Amino acid sequence: MSLYPRDKAIIALSDGTVEHGYAIGKKGTTGGELCFNTSMVGYQEIFTDPSYYGQLMMMTYPHIGNYGTMSRDDEARRVMISGLIVRSFSWEHSNPQADGNLQQYLEQNEVVGISGIDTRKLVRHIRSKGVMNAVISSEELDEEALVEKARNWEDMVGLELATEVTRTEPQTVHSDGPFKIAAFDYGIKQSIIDNFVKRGCTLRIFPAKGDFKKELEQWQPDGFFFSNGPGDPVATAEYAMDVVKYAKQTGKPIFGICLGHQLMALSEGISTKKMFVGHRGANHPVKNLETGLVEITTQNHGFAVDEKELDESKVEITHKNLNDGTIEGLRFRNFPGMSVQYHPEASPGPHDSRYLFNQFLDMIKEGKKEMA
Protein backbone atom coordinates (compact mmCIF):
# COMPACT_ATOMS: atom_id res chain seq x y z
CA MET A 1 0.00 0.00 0.00
CA SER A 2 1.38 3.43 -0.98
CA LEU A 3 2.24 5.93 1.76
CA TYR A 4 1.26 8.79 -0.57
CA PRO A 5 -2.02 9.76 -2.27
CA ARG A 6 -2.85 7.82 -5.42
CA ASP A 7 -5.85 9.75 -6.68
CA LYS A 8 -6.41 9.22 -10.37
CA ALA A 9 -5.76 11.88 -13.00
CA ILE A 10 -5.89 12.12 -16.79
CA ILE A 11 -4.05 14.12 -19.42
CA ALA A 12 -5.92 14.44 -22.72
CA LEU A 13 -4.38 15.93 -25.88
CA SER A 14 -6.28 17.72 -28.61
CA ASP A 15 -5.42 14.96 -31.12
CA GLY A 16 -7.28 12.39 -28.98
CA THR A 17 -4.28 10.95 -27.12
CA VAL A 18 -5.14 10.12 -23.50
CA GLU A 19 -2.82 9.02 -20.68
CA HIS A 20 -3.74 8.01 -17.12
CA GLY A 21 -1.72 8.79 -14.02
CA TYR A 22 -1.96 10.12 -10.48
CA ALA A 23 -2.84 13.56 -9.17
CA ILE A 24 -0.19 15.91 -7.77
CA GLY A 25 -0.54 19.48 -6.63
CA LYS A 26 -4.03 20.96 -6.46
CA LYS A 27 -7.04 18.84 -7.36
CA GLY A 28 -8.79 20.30 -10.36
CA THR A 29 -8.72 20.78 -14.13
CA THR A 30 -6.33 22.89 -16.18
CA GLY A 31 -5.17 23.23 -19.75
CA GLY A 32 -2.85 24.97 -22.17
CA GLU A 33 -0.21 24.37 -24.79
CA LEU A 34 1.71 21.19 -23.96
CA CYS A 35 5.46 21.70 -24.02
CA PHE A 36 8.45 19.90 -22.55
CA ASN A 37 11.75 20.93 -20.96
CA THR A 38 14.86 18.73 -21.05
CA SER A 39 16.66 20.30 -18.07
CA MET A 40 17.84 17.86 -15.39
CA VAL A 41 17.65 20.44 -12.60
CA GLY A 42 16.07 23.83 -12.02
CA TYR A 43 12.42 22.82 -12.03
CA GLN A 44 11.44 25.65 -9.68
CA GLU A 45 13.08 28.28 -11.90
CA ILE A 46 11.25 26.78 -14.88
CA PHE A 47 7.87 26.77 -13.12
CA THR A 48 8.24 30.47 -12.20
CA ASP A 49 9.52 31.66 -15.58
CA PRO A 50 6.84 34.08 -16.90
CA SER A 51 7.55 32.97 -20.47
CA TYR A 52 5.75 29.70 -19.62
CA TYR A 53 2.49 31.41 -18.72
CA GLY A 54 -0.43 29.57 -20.30
CA GLN A 55 1.52 26.35 -20.91
CA LEU A 56 1.51 22.86 -19.46
CA MET A 57 5.04 21.87 -18.49
CA MET A 58 6.22 18.30 -19.06
CA MET A 59 9.61 17.56 -17.51
CA THR A 60 11.66 14.97 -19.40
CA TYR A 61 13.96 14.25 -16.47
CA PRO A 62 12.15 11.43 -14.62
CA HIS A 63 12.63 12.48 -10.96
CA ILE A 64 11.04 15.81 -10.06
CA GLY A 65 10.74 17.23 -6.54
CA ASN A 66 13.65 15.38 -4.94
CA TYR A 67 15.40 18.55 -3.71
CA GLY A 68 12.25 20.42 -2.65
CA THR A 69 11.80 24.15 -3.16
CA MET A 70 13.53 27.33 -1.96
CA SER A 71 12.10 30.84 -2.22
CA ARG A 72 15.42 32.20 -3.49
CA ASP A 73 15.07 30.08 -6.64
CA ASP A 74 11.86 31.79 -7.81
CA GLU A 75 12.16 33.76 -11.06
CA ALA A 76 8.85 35.54 -10.38
CA ARG A 77 6.54 36.04 -7.43
CA ARG A 78 4.28 33.15 -8.42
CA VAL A 79 4.24 29.96 -10.45
CA MET A 80 3.54 30.68 -14.11
CA ILE A 81 2.92 27.27 -15.67
CA SER A 82 -0.70 26.17 -16.11
CA GLY A 83 -0.02 22.58 -15.11
CA LEU A 84 2.71 19.98 -14.55
CA ILE A 85 3.37 16.53 -16.03
CA VAL A 86 6.09 14.28 -14.59
CA ARG A 87 7.09 10.62 -14.60
CA SER A 88 8.19 10.11 -11.00
CA PHE A 89 7.11 12.65 -8.38
CA SER A 90 9.04 13.02 -5.10
CA TRP A 91 6.65 13.66 -2.23
CA GLU A 92 9.62 14.04 0.10
CA HIS A 93 12.87 15.93 -0.45
CA SER A 94 16.43 15.35 0.72
CA ASN A 95 17.72 18.93 0.70
CA PRO A 96 18.28 20.40 4.19
CA GLN A 97 18.27 23.94 2.74
CA ALA A 98 14.79 23.59 1.23
CA ASP A 99 11.84 25.59 2.52
CA GLY A 100 9.43 22.73 1.84
CA ASN A 101 8.46 19.94 -0.53
CA LEU A 102 7.20 20.36 -4.07
CA GLN A 103 3.69 19.13 -3.26
CA GLN A 104 3.23 21.92 -0.72
CA TYR A 105 4.63 24.41 -3.23
CA LEU A 106 2.22 23.31 -5.98
CA GLU A 107 -0.74 23.40 -3.62
CA GLN A 108 0.15 26.89 -2.38
CA ASN A 109 0.38 28.10 -5.98
CA GLU A 110 -2.80 26.22 -7.03
CA VAL A 111 -1.07 24.18 -9.74
CA VAL A 112 -2.80 21.06 -11.05
CA GLY A 113 -0.47 18.24 -12.05
CA ILE A 114 -0.17 14.59 -12.98
CA SER A 115 2.53 11.99 -12.28
CA GLY A 116 3.11 8.40 -13.35
CA ILE A 117 3.15 9.40 -17.03
CA ASP A 118 5.53 7.85 -19.56
CA THR A 119 6.99 11.25 -20.43
CA ARG A 120 9.48 9.77 -22.89
CA LYS A 121 6.59 8.34 -24.92
CA LEU A 122 4.61 11.57 -24.76
CA VAL A 123 7.61 13.72 -25.73
CA ARG A 124 8.27 11.51 -28.76
CA HIS A 125 4.60 11.92 -29.71
CA ILE A 126 4.82 15.73 -29.51
CA ARG A 127 8.09 15.78 -31.46
CA SER A 128 6.50 13.83 -34.32
CA LYS A 129 3.04 15.44 -34.31
CA GLY A 130 3.96 19.00 -33.29
CA VAL A 131 2.95 21.16 -30.37
CA MET A 132 -0.71 20.98 -29.36
CA ASN A 133 -3.06 21.86 -26.53
CA ALA A 134 -3.91 19.48 -23.69
CA VAL A 135 -5.96 19.27 -20.51
CA ILE A 136 -5.06 17.74 -17.13
CA SER A 137 -7.82 16.78 -14.71
CA SER A 138 -8.00 15.05 -11.34
CA GLU A 139 -11.71 15.80 -10.91
CA GLU A 140 -13.24 14.93 -14.28
CA LEU A 141 -12.22 11.54 -15.68
CA ASP A 142 -14.37 11.41 -18.83
CA GLU A 143 -11.81 10.93 -21.63
CA GLU A 144 -14.00 12.18 -24.48
CA ALA A 145 -15.04 15.29 -22.58
CA LEU A 146 -11.43 16.15 -21.74
CA VAL A 147 -10.26 15.65 -25.34
CA GLU A 148 -13.02 17.98 -26.49
CA LYS A 149 -11.98 20.52 -23.85
CA ALA A 150 -8.38 20.35 -25.11
CA ARG A 151 -9.56 20.93 -28.69
CA ASN A 152 -11.47 24.01 -27.63
CA TRP A 153 -8.64 25.49 -25.54
CA GLU A 154 -7.38 28.86 -26.79
CA ASP A 155 -4.54 28.53 -29.28
CA MET A 156 -1.19 30.19 -28.59
CA VAL A 157 -1.02 31.74 -32.07
CA GLY A 158 -2.39 35.27 -31.85
CA LEU A 159 -2.51 35.16 -28.06
CA GLU A 160 -1.29 38.21 -26.10
CA LEU A 161 -0.06 37.19 -22.64
CA ALA A 162 2.61 39.69 -21.61
CA THR A 163 0.05 41.90 -19.86
CA GLU A 164 -0.89 38.89 -17.70
CA VAL A 165 2.59 38.62 -16.18
CA THR A 166 4.02 42.16 -16.21
CA ARG A 167 4.25 44.49 -13.19
CA THR A 168 1.50 47.05 -12.72
CA GLU A 169 3.67 50.17 -12.31
CA PRO A 170 7.27 51.28 -12.94
CA GLN A 171 9.86 50.15 -10.42
CA THR A 172 13.50 51.15 -9.89
CA VAL A 173 16.12 48.58 -8.92
CA HIS A 174 19.24 50.40 -7.77
CA SER A 175 22.94 49.62 -7.97
CA ASP A 176 26.10 51.58 -7.16
CA GLY A 177 27.27 51.51 -10.77
CA PRO A 178 27.20 54.16 -13.50
CA PHE A 179 24.68 52.68 -15.96
CA LYS A 180 20.98 53.50 -16.26
CA ILE A 181 18.86 50.99 -18.19
CA ALA A 182 15.19 51.36 -19.11
CA ALA A 183 13.86 47.79 -19.05
CA PHE A 184 10.46 46.77 -20.37
CA ASP A 185 8.81 43.94 -18.51
CA TYR A 186 7.00 41.50 -20.79
CA GLY A 187 7.73 38.76 -18.26
CA ILE A 188 11.24 39.65 -17.11
CA LYS A 189 13.04 37.00 -15.03
CA GLN A 190 14.66 37.90 -11.72
CA SER A 191 17.97 36.42 -12.93
CA ILE A 192 18.07 38.94 -15.78
CA ILE A 193 17.58 41.79 -13.32
CA ASP A 194 20.32 40.33 -11.09
CA ASN A 195 22.77 40.08 -13.99
CA PHE A 196 22.29 43.75 -14.82
CA VAL A 197 22.51 44.95 -11.21
CA LYS A 198 25.72 43.09 -10.40
CA ARG A 199 27.29 44.75 -13.45
CA GLY A 200 26.55 48.21 -12.09
CA CYS A 201 23.21 48.91 -13.76
CA THR A 202 20.32 50.76 -12.16
CA LEU A 203 17.13 49.55 -13.82
CA ARG A 204 13.94 51.49 -14.26
CA ILE A 205 11.53 48.64 -15.08
CA PHE A 206 8.36 49.61 -16.92
CA PRO A 207 5.15 47.60 -17.38
CA ALA A 208 4.51 46.01 -20.75
CA LYS A 209 1.80 48.47 -21.71
CA GLY A 210 1.57 52.23 -21.27
CA ASP A 211 2.80 55.61 -22.45
CA PHE A 212 6.14 56.23 -20.72
CA LYS A 213 7.71 58.63 -23.21
CA LYS A 214 7.68 61.64 -20.87
CA GLU A 215 9.18 59.67 -17.99
CA LEU A 216 11.85 58.20 -20.26
CA GLU A 217 12.79 61.67 -21.50
CA GLN A 218 13.13 62.87 -17.91
CA TRP A 219 15.05 59.84 -16.66
CA GLN A 220 17.46 59.74 -19.64
CA PRO A 221 18.54 56.10 -19.66
CA ASP A 222 21.87 55.05 -21.18
CA GLY A 223 20.25 52.10 -22.94
CA PHE A 224 17.08 50.09 -23.39
CA PHE A 225 16.29 46.45 -22.64
CA PHE A 226 13.32 44.43 -23.92
CA SER A 227 12.63 41.29 -21.92
CA ASN A 228 11.44 37.76 -22.43
CA GLY A 229 7.75 36.95 -22.12
CA PRO A 230 4.90 34.63 -23.10
CA GLY A 231 2.49 34.56 -26.02
CA ASP A 232 2.64 35.42 -29.69
CA PRO A 233 5.13 38.25 -30.39
CA VAL A 234 2.89 39.64 -33.13
CA ALA A 235 0.10 40.13 -30.59
CA THR A 236 2.48 41.82 -28.14
CA ALA A 237 3.84 44.04 -30.91
CA GLU A 238 0.40 45.64 -31.36
CA TYR A 239 1.12 47.82 -28.32
CA ALA A 240 4.86 47.31 -27.69
CA MET A 241 6.02 48.57 -31.08
CA ASP A 242 5.62 52.23 -30.11
CA VAL A 243 8.23 52.01 -27.35
CA VAL A 244 10.57 49.88 -29.48
CA LYS A 245 10.46 52.52 -32.20
CA TYR A 246 10.98 55.28 -29.63
CA ALA A 247 14.05 53.51 -28.26
CA LYS A 248 15.47 53.19 -31.78
CA GLN A 249 14.95 56.91 -32.42
CA THR A 250 17.04 57.86 -29.37
CA GLY A 251 20.12 56.32 -30.94
CA LYS A 252 21.01 54.64 -27.64
CA PRO A 253 22.00 50.96 -27.40
CA ILE A 254 19.22 48.37 -27.24
CA PHE A 255 19.35 44.75 -26.03
CA GLY A 256 16.57 42.19 -26.41
CA ILE A 257 16.19 38.67 -25.05
CA CYS A 258 13.67 36.10 -26.36
CA LEU A 259 10.38 38.02 -26.88
CA GLY A 260 12.42 41.23 -26.86
CA HIS A 261 14.55 39.80 -29.67
CA GLN A 262 11.41 39.03 -31.67
CA LEU A 263 9.95 42.51 -31.09
CA MET A 264 13.16 44.13 -32.31
CA ALA A 265 13.07 42.01 -35.48
CA LEU A 266 9.39 42.86 -36.05
CA SER A 267 10.24 46.55 -35.73
CA GLU A 268 12.48 46.15 -38.78
CA GLY A 269 9.77 44.43 -40.80
CA ILE A 270 11.13 40.90 -40.23
CA SER A 271 8.41 38.34 -39.48
CA THR A 272 8.22 35.73 -36.74
CA LYS A 273 6.80 32.21 -37.01
CA LYS A 274 5.31 29.53 -34.76
CA MET A 275 7.71 26.62 -34.37
CA PHE A 276 6.73 22.99 -34.89
CA VAL A 277 7.83 22.05 -31.38
CA GLY A 278 9.93 24.85 -29.88
CA HIS A 279 13.15 24.95 -27.88
CA ARG A 280 13.03 24.38 -24.13
CA GLY A 281 15.99 23.13 -22.15
CA ALA A 282 19.45 23.92 -20.82
CA ASN A 283 21.66 22.12 -23.34
CA HIS A 284 21.00 23.67 -26.75
CA PRO A 285 24.15 24.23 -28.85
CA VAL A 286 24.39 27.67 -30.46
CA LYS A 287 27.22 28.82 -32.70
CA ASN A 288 28.49 32.36 -32.31
CA LEU A 289 29.16 33.29 -35.94
CA GLU A 290 31.45 36.16 -34.94
CA THR A 291 33.85 34.06 -32.85
CA GLY A 292 33.24 30.59 -34.27
CA LEU A 293 32.72 29.26 -30.74
CA VAL A 294 29.83 27.04 -29.69
CA GLU A 295 27.83 27.97 -26.60
CA ILE A 296 25.64 25.57 -24.63
CA THR A 297 22.54 27.61 -23.95
CA THR A 298 19.28 27.72 -22.02
CA GLN A 299 16.23 28.18 -24.23
CA ASN A 300 12.49 28.66 -23.84
CA HIS A 301 10.53 29.74 -26.90
CA GLY A 302 7.82 28.48 -29.22
CA PHE A 303 8.17 31.32 -31.76
CA ALA A 304 11.24 32.35 -33.76
CA VAL A 305 12.39 34.97 -36.24
CA ASP A 306 11.58 33.68 -39.72
CA GLU A 307 14.84 33.20 -41.62
CA LYS A 308 12.92 33.33 -44.92
CA GLU A 309 11.91 36.93 -44.12
CA LEU A 310 15.43 38.06 -43.20
CA ASP A 311 16.63 41.34 -44.70
CA GLU A 312 20.44 41.46 -44.62
CA SER A 313 20.40 45.20 -45.27
CA LYS A 314 18.79 45.61 -41.84
CA VAL A 315 20.26 42.82 -39.71
CA GLU A 316 23.24 40.53 -39.41
CA ILE A 317 22.86 37.02 -37.98
CA THR A 318 25.25 36.61 -35.05
CA HIS A 319 24.13 33.27 -33.61
CA LYS A 320 22.56 30.12 -35.08
CA ASN A 321 21.12 26.99 -33.48
CA LEU A 322 23.19 23.94 -34.39
CA ASN A 323 20.27 21.54 -33.99
CA ASP A 324 17.91 23.06 -36.54
CA GLY A 325 19.64 26.14 -37.97
CA THR A 326 17.15 28.64 -36.57
CA ILE A 327 18.21 32.22 -35.88
CA GLU A 328 19.46 32.70 -32.31
CA GLY A 329 21.00 36.17 -32.45
CA LEU A 330 20.90 39.40 -34.46
CA ARG A 331 22.88 42.60 -34.74
CA PHE A 332 20.99 45.54 -36.20
CA ARG A 333 22.47 47.77 -38.88
CA ASN A 334 20.14 50.79 -38.68
CA PHE A 335 20.52 51.37 -34.93
CA PRO A 336 22.89 50.19 -32.14
CA GLY A 337 21.03 47.03 -31.18
CA MET A 338 21.71 43.38 -30.41
CA SER A 339 19.36 40.56 -29.51
CA VAL A 340 19.32 36.85 -28.78
CA GLN A 341 16.56 34.27 -28.86
CA TYR A 342 18.02 32.21 -26.00
CA HIS A 343 18.59 33.10 -22.33
CA PRO A 344 22.11 34.29 -21.41
CA GLU A 345 21.10 34.61 -17.73
CA ALA A 346 20.63 30.80 -17.88
CA SER A 347 18.58 30.05 -14.80
CA PRO A 348 18.72 27.12 -14.81
CA GLY A 349 21.59 26.37 -17.12
CA PRO A 350 25.21 26.95 -18.16
CA HIS A 351 26.91 30.33 -18.05
CA ASP A 352 28.49 30.24 -21.52
CA SER A 353 26.51 33.25 -22.77
CA ARG A 354 26.61 35.72 -19.90
CA TYR A 355 29.24 37.71 -21.81
CA LEU A 356 26.31 39.20 -23.76
CA PHE A 357 25.45 41.44 -20.81
CA ASN A 358 29.02 42.75 -20.92
CA GLN A 359 28.79 43.31 -24.68
CA PHE A 360 25.69 45.43 -24.17
CA LEU A 361 27.43 47.53 -21.53
CA ASP A 362 30.41 47.94 -23.87
CA MET A 363 27.98 49.37 -26.43
CA ILE A 364 26.74 51.83 -23.82
CA LYS A 365 30.29 52.87 -22.92
CA GLU A 366 31.08 53.48 -26.60
CA GLY A 367 27.89 55.48 -26.97
CA LYS A 368 28.81 57.68 -24.01
CA LYS A 369 32.25 58.33 -25.48
CA GLU A 370 30.73 59.43 -28.78
CA MET A 371 28.36 61.82 -26.99
CA ALA A 372 31.11 63.28 -24.76
Image: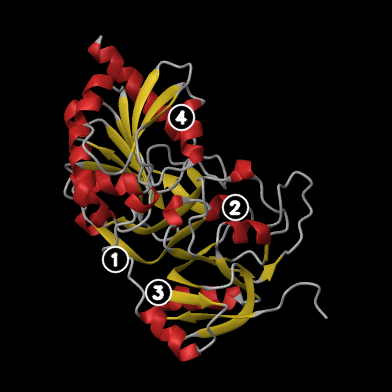
On screen, residue 296 above or below 203: below
On screen, residue 6 above or below 233: below
> Label 3: which residue?
132
- Where residue 81 appears, x then y in whole percent? 49, 60
- Where residue 22 appears, x then y in whole percent? 65, 77
Question: From this viewpoint, is residue 251 visible?
Answer: no
First in sequence, mark 3 or 2: give its number. Answer: 2
Q: Residue extending furthest right?
A: 1
Query: Image check: 254 left or right of 58?
Result: left
> Label 2: which residue?
44
Tell me the distance, in whole angstroms, between the alpha carbons under discs 4 and 3.
35 Å
Within 10 angstroms of label 3, few (less than 14), some, or many (20 or more) residues?
Answer: many
On screen, residue 59 above or below 161: below
Within 10 angstroms of label 2, few (less than 14), some, or many (20 or more) residues?
Answer: many
CB under 8 Å between callouts 4 and 2?
Answer: no
Within 10 angstroms of label 4, few (less than 14), some, or many (20 or more) residues?
Answer: many
Q: Quadrant of residue 32?
A: bottom left
> Label 4: which residue?
196
For badge 3, the amino acid type reads Met
Foreground mark, 4 or 2, reads: 2
